[in-house]
Image: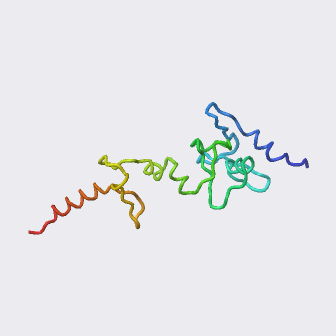
């Protein structure tokens, strides 16, 4: 039986550089778009292997964020170790979309004295809209 080729050789043959600067994974991928790589011991996410090989160990409690938003990218320059909260905030999911909002649906800025952050319920609220809603509620529910 021939000896297994070095992991870096097997890894680099599955990479392809794109015009955007991404280095896309051309090996096995999950349905979610993340690449998979057998490192000689176990199968692991290709972007995590790339980060650990080219940058260094991933600190405990952090995960790898694709700065390019391309899940199949293994370019270490496009990868950053961040907290889960930061990764979600930067993403295109619910948390990322809402974190990017600067104004409430009525157009009031989420800033300064108008910004209310509830201590018990996650989220940001517009103080002006809360004040207007409370006034409307009191007006509609007056007892005569």
List the single residue furthest toward the front: 112
Assign the C terminus to one quadrant of the image. bottom left
List the single residue furthest toward the right: 1
132 sits left or right of 10 in the view:
left
List the single residue furthest toward the bottom: 143
Q: Position of residue 18 (x, y in %)?
A: 65, 33
101 sits left or right of 32 in the view:
left
Q: Position of residue 90 (x, y in %)?
A: 52, 49
50 sits left or right of 138 in the view:
right
- Residue pictured at 76% horizontal, 38% vertical: 13
Q: Position of residue 64 (x, y in %)?
A: 63, 51
Q: Quarter-wise, where is residue 118 in the image?
A: bottom left
List the single residue furthest toward the left: 144
Q: Position of residue 142 (x, y in %)?
A: 13, 66
- Residue pictured at 67% horizontal, 58% vertical: 59
User: Which coloring applies here?
Assistant: rainbow
- Residue pictured at 18% horizontal, 64% vertical: 138
**Count of numbered labels shown in the rendering:** 0
Q: Nearer the viewer, residue 100 or 18?
A: 100
């Amino acid at each position: 039986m021939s000896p297994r080729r070095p992991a870096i050789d097997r890894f680099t043959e599955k990479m392809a550089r794109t015009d955007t600067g991404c280095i896309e994974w051309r090996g096995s991928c999950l349905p979610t778009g993340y690449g998979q790589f057998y490192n000689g011991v176990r199968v692991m996410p290709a972007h995590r292997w790339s980060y650990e090989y080219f940058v260094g160990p991933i600190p405990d409690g952090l995960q790898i964020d694709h700065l390019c938003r391309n899940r199949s990218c293994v370019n270490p320059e496009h990868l950053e170790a961040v907290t889960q909260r930061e990764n979600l905030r930067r993403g295109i999911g619910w948390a990322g979309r809402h974190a990017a909002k600067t104004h409430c649906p009525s157009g009031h800025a989420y800033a300064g004295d108008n910004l209310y952050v509830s201590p018990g319920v996650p989220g940001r609220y517009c103080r002006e809209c809360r004040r207007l809603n409370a006034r409307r509620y009191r007006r509609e529910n007056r007892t005569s």
